[in-house]
Image: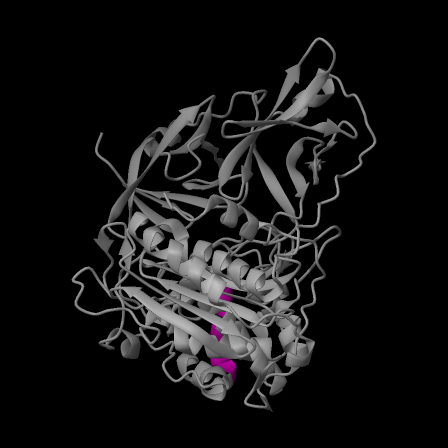
Amino acid sequence: MTRISRRSFVAGAACAGAAFAPAFGAAKFASGSTDFSPAIAQILDHLPRVLADNDIPGFALGLIDRGTLFWAQGFGFTDRSKQQKVTPDTLFSLQSISKSYTATAMLKAVEKGLLQLDDRLTRHVPEFTVHSRFGSGEVDRITLRHLLSHRAGLCHEAPIGNNYDDRPCTFGAHIRSIADTWLICPVGAEYHYSNIGIDLAGYALQRRVGMPFARIVKEFVFDPIGMQASTFDATDALASPNMTRGHVGAFETPRIPVPMVPSGAMYSTISDMARYVAFQLAGGRVDGQQVLSEGLLAEMARPQFPVPNQIDGYGLGLYNVASFGGVKLLHGGGGYGFSTDQRWMPAYGLGVVALCNQQNGGMAQTIGNLALWHLVASRLGYVPPTASDAAINEPRADPDAAQLQPLEGTYRRRGRLVAFTVETTDIVDNLVLVVGTDRQTLHAGSATTFSRDNTRYTFVAGADGKIRGVTVESPAYIENAVEFWALNDTPHDPPGADRPAWKAFVGKYVAQEYGQPVAAEIAIRNGYLYLDGSADIDWHGGLKLTEYQPHLFFTADGDSIAFAPGKMALGNRPFVKQAA
């Protein structure tokens, strides 16, 4: 466990209400102290213990103020041999931070008139196709804006070249394999974080410009900003003697190219990334020259497809989070043995970059957020208090147990299962939300609308009148202030079909994750096929599967499960069946 000050971390993680649009330009920065020695002292007091407690071989941290990297330091080593120390110029794999740089290159292409954000993907990649349960026209509705904001309805991984596939493959083979995936939901309907969406956007840019993606980003982004060490070319990066090795716990990950190029294959240093943060803080200017228009930079930060009551959101390759009395823009990364983070606050002119060669724990994001909190405290002399999230004032209703029982069941919430259950006292019937061991009694506004503090739960019925999920409105979700939790199963489900053919799928399956086994099990309960996971998978409550075709099933929230003799693909992640 980390030994970061609990009080500091809680304060640093707090969100304050703020407008979406950040303030750009040096003249608009908040005034305040330029003495950051208290922040540096706090960071240096905690950081060595945090690195030791979390088994982090190497770490680099950079602090930016109004366009200047005023402090940067490396800690530990590039690998466990301890032969080479980490410095601000050590090269790290950035993983998903790559998405921000891909989006910046796309916006530069927009500025050059090469394409538009609302161009349909098939305009630039006419052969693209994907499987859909929602109609044959869905593919033609996908735009570049959908791809860059995770609104295309695409799943997370491709069958070839993904976070769990260490087989060598080309970027083209990775893109072509997307045709074998299934849409999770109709295009534009919901936010679903997707590596392949960003990869498709980058591929469309590559096709439009007519040169390799790595060269495009170099010419459109890295060279104008002055990021001379940064690259999307794995051959160059992995050959560098100053490249770190990734780690997952004690396991050192193999040094292989990341196949998801636009979404996760960028390599950079603290020194280079500080120049990018400075470019952002300066409203797209570098050394007095406008590299990208302020309007396009603001569009990058603006949450896309906002909904009523939204507070925070995902823009174009960038998170927008109300925090510390202003707007915090950020993206993190994790995978292949790395944890990374970059974040900045335009109103204060402050930014942080944190790079780590230990994937477990996501410590780069934790430390990056805490460091920014300390910078704000040094600049202002205090951290602006968190604006109290206004409680939702629903009219009070008193539905009885018979009205509440159709809402009971387990629901899929961001990869894990939660439950709603009815509890009856001598006075009233209540709907209770159960998350792990936490139980929250909800206030009823009607028989289908409930609230608790600043969160509203609205149960949604399908065309058949049966509950299919719950819409949850809360300012606490940085991806989108409104989530949809799909109904997984209920205690009132009638017995299922229990098809004899399903018995061939029953058993234990194992996948590899960076050299470590991950287990899952298929079982039949109440006549339905269920996918059970071990505690480390987060859906050990059991995902109910619905048959779409023989050997092809879907979870409630759209993940595909495909069976073949001795194999199972869960969302394109391969599992191998174990002998009985």
Asked if residue 218 can be seen in this view, the reply is yes
**Looking at the rendering, in which quadrant would you find the C terminus?**
top left
Taking 314 as reference, is 438 above or below it? above
Q: Residue at x 49, y 82 (%)?
A: 221
Q: Is residue 221 inside the magenta stretch? A: no
572 or 424: nearer the viewer: 424
Q: Is residue 465 left or right of residue 490?
A: right
Q: Residue 346: x, y in percent?
A: 62, 70
Q: Is residue 305 left or right of residue 288?
A: right
383 or 35: nearer the viewer: 35
Q: Is residue 137 left or right of residue 173?
A: right
Q: Identify the image quadrant of residue 510.
A: top left
Give the magenta-colored segment's residue range: 197-208
Q: Residue at x 34, y 66 (%)?
A: 258
Q: Residue 241: x, y in percent?
A: 22, 76
Taking 205 as reference, is 407 above or below it? above
Q: Identify the image quadrant of residue 95.
A: bottom left
- Name, please, the residue furthest toward the top: 426
**Looking at the rendering, in which quadrant would you find the N terminus?**
top left
